[in-house]
Image (tube, helix red, strand yellow):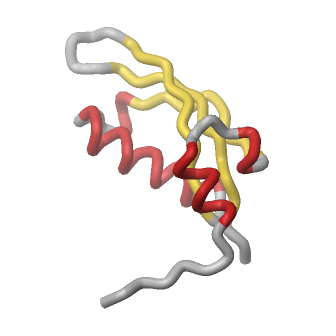
Amino acid sequence: MSVKTFEIHGEMKLRLGERCKFRVYVRALKEKDALEKLYSILGSRHKVTRNHIKVYSIREVNPDETDDSHIKSLASTDKVVLYA
């Protein structure tokens, strides 16, 4: 299996009742994993639960199409080495 880049469009409801649209790029093996990563990211950053997040679309994209430099650099690496 290879890691893919997914673009996720959606909307979240913030604490004050306002809605905020988002577009997030996530690296994952499957769409299901990308969705779980999205919930983790938005919950951590904005303290929203899954009930407050509405996903409109998930699509696989070429890493070169993204605006996120972190995603581009992860996609271009051949091997990741972890030091203990």
Q: Quadrant of residue 82?
A: bottom left
Q: Quadrant of the C terminus?
A: bottom left
Q: Above or below — where is 14 with respect to 63?
A: above
Tell me what residue is drawn at x 57 percent, y 41 percent.
68
- Image position, residue 33 (x, y; %): 55, 60
Residue closer to the observer: 82 or 27: 82
- Image position, residue 65 (x, y; %): 75, 39
Q: Above or below — where is 77 with respect to 62?
A: below
Q: Above or below — where is 54 with respect to 5?
A: above
Tell me what residue is drawn at x 78 percent, y 48 percent.
62
Tell me what residue is drawn at x 54 percent, y 79 percent.
80
Q: Above or below — where is 8 with respect to 21?
A: below
Q: Quadrant of the N terminus?
A: bottom right
Residue 62 lies left or right of residue 19; in this view the side is: right
- Image position, residue 39 (x, y; %): 41, 45
Residue 59 lies left or right of residue 42; in this view the side is: right
